[in-house]
Image: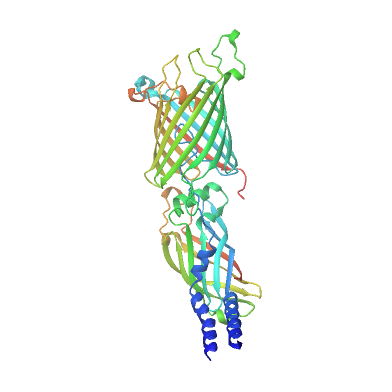
Amino acid sequence: MRYFLISFLMLLVPTIGFSQDLEAILEQESLETSPLTFGTFNGTRLLNGHSVETRKEGVLEFLISHRFGRLNSGFDQLFGLDESNIRFGFEYALHDKLTIAFGRSSLEKTFDSYLKYRLAQQKTGKTPFPFSITLFGSAAEKTIKDYLPENKPTFSERLTYTGQVLIARKFNPNLSFQLAPTYVHFNTVSTENDPHDMFVLGLGTRIKISKRVSINGEYYYNVNPFESFDTKNSLAFGIDIETGGHIFQLIFTNAVSMIEKGFITETTGGFFKGDIHFGFNISRAFQIKKPK
Amino acid sequence: MKGFYFILISAFLAQNLNAQDKYLTKEGFISFFSHSIVEDIKADNNQVLSVLDTQTGKIAIQLLMRSFMFKKTLMREHFNENYVESYKYPKATFSGEIKNFDELNEEQTETEIIGILTVHGKEKEISTKVIVNVSESEIILTGDFKVDIADFNIKIPAIVANNIAKTIKVSFELHHKPYK
């Protein structure tokens, strides 16, 4: 009888014990262990420079960027709006982690191309990782004919390379921060005193003020700038506005170039002297390949 | 000694009983559809977790909002970042009961399912028709229902108000297998 009772209890207990626990089974079977942190920044550009973000596989982004003249150029130049520099770029995501791009800037008639690879992404949960890390490498070819015919530079002499390690952390949905150690190599420099290799540290932040609007700031500190002419570190502030497939970025910066080697190393304007260029980036994303 | 075997057998039986009255799927299908004059938006989730207790007819369903796949990847990003705020509310859950579950036989039967749907941290009672298909190897639940976006405190900005329907159709198809 005693055994029978025990057996009976054993039959009962698990049934009672488990019948309420569908939720517990769900927890146990749940797939989510370490969710990735997305949307550290709104777009692939923080302001002038790149952010850690890449587009998803099969997305072609068409980017049009403008920088007008200097705000302090007065009414005669309509505060810089009479003068305009443009870059347009086609940027295609071969993979969620890999983007290839081509662009053309009106400034010094420069062609540029870059590869961007997302090395690691910030994660929370069981195996967290505190940062997103993206590698960036670009080459720019200056094609403006600002030389005497007998000094015609070769293709290689017209090239400049940039390498960056972008390291970012989204502290909370409204605050993200980015560090960007940068290396720039010039195949040709104007005088012997000018360095061929420059080391620069970039800092950037995004502060969201609403779901679709954020304020961004970006600063690049150049450790060993050019000697032959006076350059300034590039500083930029701006507003991001996100609407569906578009991102509008309104930018105030002392830099006029929209590619890395330009705004990082060749900026001459003094932001606080009023040498500020108004500009914008407009990005439109097209889904070229169907997502898997 | 005889008693001891009896206990062993009972324990075995008890486990067996447990195993057989729970049915589970990890690859359930739930999709939603929004129709508007501007565009149709559809998203599929093929990683729905659902567990069904055949003793009571109780069911618990869970999915990750991030696992909804859209035609455009940017839509998926915006859906998660701006609308359902997946970083804050990663999961949607449903906890409910299938009516008259014990009376269902091996054929396709229509009955009702009632429960609480939680999306974006907001709860809402849902009651809808469900087609239950019971066979030896699986229990299939299919159906659809409509939900109002406003019930879940999901804000649609004026600029895209014409792109997104106020009422969304949700469809489900869950193939439960015996849970071991």
Tell me: residue B177, above or below residue A108. below
Tell me: residue A251, above or below residue A124. above
The answer to whether residue B62 is left or right of residue A275 is: right
- The residue at 59%/14% (across/down) is A153
* Count of picture labels: 0
- As drawn, the residue found furthest toward the bottom would be A1
Tell me: residue A10, above or below residue A105. below
Tell me: residue A42, above or below residue A19. above
Give residue A14's position: percent from left, percent from top.
52, 78
* Residue in front for this viewpoint, A288 or A228: A228
- The residue at 47%/57% (across/down) is B90
Give residue A176's position: percent from left, percent from top.
41, 42
* Residue in front for this viewpoint, A253 or A201: A201
The answer to whether residue B139 is left or right of residue A222 is: right
- As drawn, the residue found furthest toward the left would be A273
- As drawn, the residue found furthest toward the front would be B1
Give residue B163's position: percent from left, percent from top.
49, 51
Give residue B134's position: percent from left, percent from top.
63, 75
Specify the color scheme: rainbow
Residue A186, visible in the rendered structure: yes
Q: Quadrant of residue A11?
A: bottom right
The answer to whether residue A202 is left or right of residue B63 is: left
Residue A259, visible in the rendered structure: no
- The residue at 56%/65% (across/down) is B172
